[in-house]
Image (cartoon, grey):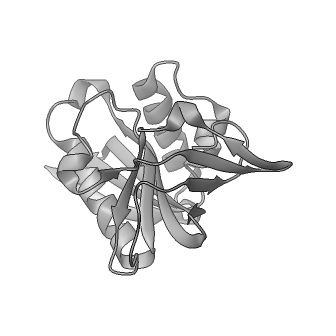
């Protein structure tokens, strides 16, 4: 039986963090680096556990995204991963549904960069593709992130308000992949 658990990074033990690290690095098979690991920390983790073993994960970390001129407190989803031998059993869907609840409960907007390579996965859970140009608030000014256009998804919350998905969307700056 699969059990979902929410925990902040600070609430996780050293052993749990190490198990989490092994899970995400293993699941991404070389497409996950130290910056990605750091990006997945500092928020709320959704952990799927079976027989005491971590089998799937996703985290929601706080960021600020600016849609046009509107700065939005954003729950940004990172590190969505399922152990290879447990894939195709709905675990990522369970984790993402719970991550969506975390976003709905505490943020003005949800966002993520879709790296699943599974068309429609997030959209069936209510996420929408950002249709406008993407940017990052770089240390020396705005940086256009055209390679991310079409892959950034957002989840509206009761606090979102009116949102034009065709306008510019700017993320706060961070080392590694900004989105």
Name the residue rendered at 22%, 31% in the picture. Answer: 86
In the rendered structure, the answer to whether residue 145 lies left or right of residue 114 reads: right
Name the residue rendered at 54%, 72% in the picture. Answer: 73
Q: Is residue 68 above or below residue 70?
A: above
Q: Total of numbered circles in the picture? A: 0
In the rendered structure, the answer to whether residue 130 lies left or right of residue 97 reads: right
Picture coordinates of residue 143 (x, y %)?
A: 72, 43
Instruction: Give the camera-side residue of 150 and 109.
Output: 150
Q: Is residue 28 above or below residue 123?
A: above
Name the residue rendered at 54%, 71% in the picture. Answer: 72
Picture coordinates of residue 74 (x, y %)?
A: 51, 66
In the rendered structure, the answer to whether residue 50 lies left or right of residue 109 reads: left
> Which residue reaches farthest top?
30
Image quadrant for the C terminus?
Answer: top right
Instruction: Give the camera-side residue of 16 and 112.
Output: 112
Residue 104's image quarter?
bottom left
Q: Is residue 152 visible?
A: yes
Name the residue rendered at 29%, 50% in the picture. Answer: 48
Q: Is residue 94 above or below residue 67?
A: above
Picture coordinates of residue 150 (x, y %)?
A: 41, 38
In the rendered structure, the answer to whether residue 43 lies left or right of residue 47 reads: right
Q: Is residue 50 visible?
A: no
């Amino acid at each position: 039986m699969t059990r979902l658990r929410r925990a902040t990074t600070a609430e996780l033990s050293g052993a749990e963090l190490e198990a989490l690290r092994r899970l995400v690095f293993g699941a991404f098979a070389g497409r996950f680096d130290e910056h990605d690991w750091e990006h997945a920390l500092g928020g709320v983790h959704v952990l799927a556990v079976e027989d005491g073993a971590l089998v799937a994960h996703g985290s929601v970390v706080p960021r600020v995204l600016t849609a046009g001129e509107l700065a939005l407190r954003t729950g940004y989803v990172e590190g969505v991963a399922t152990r290879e031998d447990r894939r195709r059993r709905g675990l990522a869907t369970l984790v993402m549904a719970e991550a969506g609840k975390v976003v709905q409960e505490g943020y003005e907007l949800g966002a993520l960069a879709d790296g699943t390579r599974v068309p429609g996965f997030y959209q069936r859970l209510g996420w929408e593709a950002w249709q406008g140009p993407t940017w990052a608030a770089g240390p020396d000014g705005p940086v256009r992130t055209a390679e991310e256009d079409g892959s950034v998804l957002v989840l509206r919350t009761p606090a979102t308000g009116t949102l034009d998905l065709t306008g510019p969307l700017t993320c706060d700056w961070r080392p590694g992949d900004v989105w």
